Each structure stands twice: as C-alpha cells, then as structure tokens.
Amino acid sequence: MLTQRLVLTGDEAHDKPLIQQAAAIIRAGGLVAFPTETVYGLGADALNSEAVRRIFTAKGRPAWDPLIVHVDTPDAIRRYTRDCSVLTEQLIRAFMPGPLTLVLPKQEAISDVVTAGRDTVAIRIPQHPVARALIRYSGTPIAAPSANKFGRPSPTTADHVLHDLNGEIEAVLDAGQTPMGVESTILDMTTQPPTLLRPGGVPKEAIEAIIGRVRVLGEPIPEGESLPAPGLSARHYAPQAKVLLCAPEPDIFYGTLKDALSQYAIVGALRPDSWRAPDDPRLRLFEWGAWGDWETLAQRLFLGLRALEKEQAHAIVCPLPPEEGLARALRDRLLRAAR
Ligand code: AMP
Ligand code: MG
C-alpha cells in the first residue's frame, strides 16, 4: 500500500479538500493518521469493527489494549456514553475541547473492538483544528490511539508516523509538529472518586480544582496483567536505546553522563539548557529546553528520544521531572520508557 502524505499549510482553501479526502478514506473503512494537540493519532471509523481491527494490525497493538474515541461536540459524548454525571458535565465544560479523556459507560454503537470488550469507552474532544475538521467531515466518531508502533515513543511529527507506519496506512495529514507533545490525561469516571489512569496534558491539580479529589493509580504494573489503562503497561513509549534516568541536578546529570560513557559506545542525552556535559565525541546531545519549562520539555520529549535513537545512541541519559503539574506526565512517560 502507498501511504499518501497530505501536506497542510494552514490556509483553509488549500487544506479543506485534503482533509475531506482523508475523511472519505475514514468513511470507506481506511486508516488516516492525523495531528491532534497532543500527538499524532491513527484514526478509523469507531462504528466500523473491521476498520478498527486494522488499527491493531498496523500498530502491532494487542487486542486487549482499548482505543480512545475522538468526537467533536459534547453532545456526541452524551450520545456514545451513558450516565453523564454532574462531575462529567463540569469537566466537559472546563476542559473540552482539550487533552482530557474520560472513561464512561459506553453505548451499543461503539464497536467492542474499540473498547477491547469493556463496557466503558475512553472518549475526548481534541482541540487541534485539523482533528476537529476531520471528525466533522467524516461524520462519525474516530477511534485513534497514537500513530506509532506499539511500545514506541509517540509520534509528534508526520515523519515519525511514516517512520513507523509507512505502507501500512492509507494517509497521514501533515500539519507539522503537534503543540503539546504528550498524550491526553485519562480519567476514569466510573469510580468514586474518579481515578487518574494516565497523567497527561491536563494536570491533576487543574482537575481537582473543578471536581475535588481524584484517586491516583500506583506505580506501573507488570506486562501482561489486566490493565485498567493500557498506557500503563510496564515498558512503553520506549526508544531502542536504554533510557537512564537521573536526579534533576546538573552535577548528577554530569556524573551520570560520565558513567554512561564508560559503559556504552554512543551515549545520548536530553540536555536542559546550559547544563554541563563531558567533552566527548561519543556524546550526542539533544538540546531539550529550560528545566522547569514543562510545556517546552513536553513538546520536545518524544522528538528528542526519536532523534537520539536515530543517532544510534545505545543509552539516553535524562533528568527525571518532579511529580507535579504537567511535569507528572513527562515523569510518567520517562519512567515507562526506562523499564
Ligand atoms: P494511546 O492513545 O495509544 O495512548 O492509547 C489509548 C489509551 O486509552 C490507552 O493507553 C488506555 O489507557 C486508554 N483507554 C482506552 N479505552 C479505555 C477504557 N475503556 N478504560 C480505560 N482506559 C482506556
Ligand atoms: Mg500510545
């Protein structure tokens, strides 16, 4: 199969026919990768089981790992789920469209393939104008996990998508780099209090300011066990290189790089601005951004992991962000990548 790259310019007259072409592929049961504000998604018609099955095949994703359904209005959330509580309505009003996914009891129409046989569905309204237009023109909810091979770092550019999936999907809508760079926050609304299944673009603190206390799941659980949320499988988001995490102190970062250089032939690092690194030709530095500027560091995390992998780094050194705000999402992805 030839994968078409549909390059968008941001000019409506230019982009509209391309997005409509992609929507026609979705309606016909095909697969289209598209930008969201978080990462690129791999979309199929969520009401078409055959189409959704192809997502699992293309990604090499196990069938027990359910997908997120993307819709374009709060009404569509109510249509495809049941029991929208007061808390759910408050979250919809506060954060949608945006990087928040809610797990809710599902309606019949959503394919069991999407939910891996569960009676709940994970659903969200993306904010990216291209994602919104694609859903609208398709006239159907779109099931979409991240558009990478299972277990790999999520794609934040169309090049990342093509690196993993070229020849296995019909098209990718290329709108450049995705603005946030980490996936949506996933909140299970079927428990009391609601449970944070995956930290992401909307910080837990912001959610608690609206609905009160949220339960947090513990540490990553081992591969193969029954998973409340598949992104929780132990090793995930991982480049081929070994990821070595260190405490977020410039001196410790320097020492960790020294150690790594004594053990690995080529060493990469996600380097915060102005943090010192040893002078060694075997070192590959990705200039990550200012430590503490979590928006920038989030946007560039997967970009950096993939760039260093491309430079053949055998190990990648990275300071571990703290457990707060948006940093919690970066910390989560890095802990899983390091397993
Ligand atoms: P991805 O978009 O590739 O990060 O994967 C979709 C994510 O959606 C998974 O990691 C799950 O955490 C989550 N998910 C989808 N459906 C459900 C569900 N019914 N219950 C809990 N989590 C879900
Ligand atoms: Mg994923």
Image (cartoon, rainbow, N blue to C red):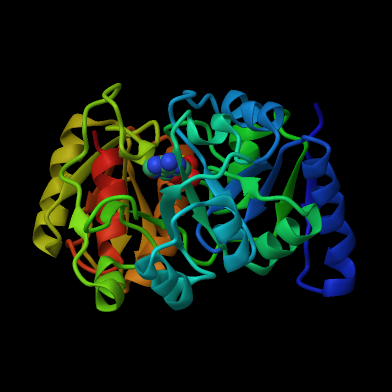
Residue at the spot 60% in from the left edge and 56% down from the top edge: 79
Image quadrant for the C terminus?
top left
Please give the name of the residue rendered at 72% of the width and 34% of the height, measured from the top-left corner.
169
Residue 18 vertical position relative to residue 223 in the rendered view, above or below: below
Relative to 95, 246 lies left or right: left
Residue 12: x %, y % from top left: 83, 73
Residue 39: where, in percent of width, then height?
52, 54
In which quadrant of the rendered view does residue 17 lie?
Answer: bottom right
143 and 332: which is toward the camera: 143
Q: Residue 58 location in percent, x, y?
A: 62, 27
Tally the marks.
0
Viewer-nearest residue: 183 or 178: 183
Task: Name the image quarter holding the N terminus.
Answer: top right
Q: Position of residue 208 (x, y in %)?
A: 25, 72
Q: Quadrant of residue 7?
A: bottom right
Answer with left or right where residue 260 lies relative to residue 73: left
Name the residue rendered at 53%, 67% in the picture: 179
Residue 311 visible in the snapshot = no
Residue 76 drawn above or below residue 246: below
Position of 62 relative to 145 (above/below)? above
327 sits to left or right of 240: left
- Answer yes or no: is residue 335 visible: yes
Tell which of 117 and 13 is nearer to you: 117
Tell me which residue sits at (72%, 37%) in the image: 31
